[in-house]
């Protein structure tokens, strides 16, 4: 079974803080993704990575950065958290590059006060 | 970029009835069409997918249809059960990424 884990289920931070969200997968997947999920908007892609030290912008990268130092770990970084970044953040991974199904982590609900 | 529209946003059916969710997309390069189900408080899970060279696929009570010319695809659930209650997302995929629809909240009532 594919296992995708995220470091926290719930996180509360203050405006201006630097926030790290961590995602780890244990199936040697090549590809990893970060989404945010907001009511009525579905899932929107923030960043993705097809290889170690590689990253690509998704549809809404502003205000975020990512790090992939190891194949199994993909981190999402909010350099200076703002209240409009309050959301559910979902990490996903997939084995093959290209149009294939992705396996999701349980999500991190981030609240920025 | 790709634009995926999904309808309806909410759907209530009685147990045993059928449910249909429809989606349209804009990017003709999309060639992969998965559907995800997300139960309350849980992660999205892939329930069925179809590729652009296939018009229809069925898996027990779930079927998907694809009209690539019209850029439409649909999810059909027959003989609905209470455990089908969830949010369903239609998704389009290209070589590089997936684009999600806004979701349909399906409520199956007894």
Image (cartoon, grey):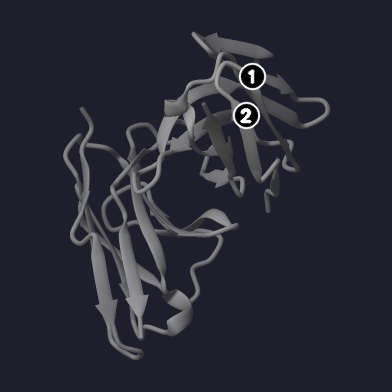
Quarter where residue A21 is shown:
bottom left
Residue B93 visible to an observer of this rendering: no
Q: Is residue A44 above or below residue B76?
A: below
Label 1, secondary structure: give it: loop
Mark 2 sits on what residue?
B13
Residue A13 % position (x, y): 28, 82
Q: Which mark is residue B18?
A: 1
Farthest-out residue, right: B70
* Secondary structure type for disc 2: strand
Q: Residue at x 31, y 54 (%)?
A: A107
Q: Chain for mark 1?
A: B
Of residues A13 and A96, which is closer to you in this image? Answer: A13
Graded by Cα atoms within 10 Å as few (under 14), some (14 to 19) or many (20 or more), the crowding at tag 1 reads: some
Q: Position of residue A102 (x, y in %)?
A: 39, 37
Q: Earlier in the sequence, mark 1 or mark 2?
A: 2
3D distance between C-alphas at marks 1 and 2: 7 Å
* Direction from residue B69 to residue A67 in the image, left or right: left
């Amino acid at each position: 079974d594919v296992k995708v884990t995220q470091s926290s289920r719930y996180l509360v931070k203050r405006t201006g803080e630097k926030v790290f969200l961590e995602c780890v997968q244990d199936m040697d997947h090549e590809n990893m993704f970060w989404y945010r999920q907001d009511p009525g908007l579905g899932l929107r892609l923030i960043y993705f990575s097809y290889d170690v030290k590689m990253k690509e912008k998704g549809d809404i990268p502003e205000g975020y950065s990512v790090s992939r130092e190891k194949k199994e770990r993909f981190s999402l970084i909010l350099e200076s958290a703002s209240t409009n970044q309050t959301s559910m953040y979902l990490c996903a991974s997939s084995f093959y590059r290209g149009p294939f199904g992705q396996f999701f982590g349980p999500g991190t609900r981030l609240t920025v006060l | 970029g790709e634009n995926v529209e999904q309808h309806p946003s909410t759907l209530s059916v009685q147990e045993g009835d059928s449910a249909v969710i429809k989606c349209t997309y804009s990017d003709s390069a999309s060639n992969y069409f998965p559907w995800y189900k997300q139960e309350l408080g849980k992660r999205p899970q892939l329930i069925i997918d179809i590729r652009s060279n296939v018009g229809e696929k069925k898996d027990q009570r779930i079927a998907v249809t694809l009209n690539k010319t019209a850029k439409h695809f649909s999810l059909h659930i027959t003989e609905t059960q209470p455990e089908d209650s969830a949010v369903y997302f239609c998704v389009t995929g290209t070589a590089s990424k997936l684009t999600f629809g806004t979701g349909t909240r399906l409520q199956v009532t007894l």
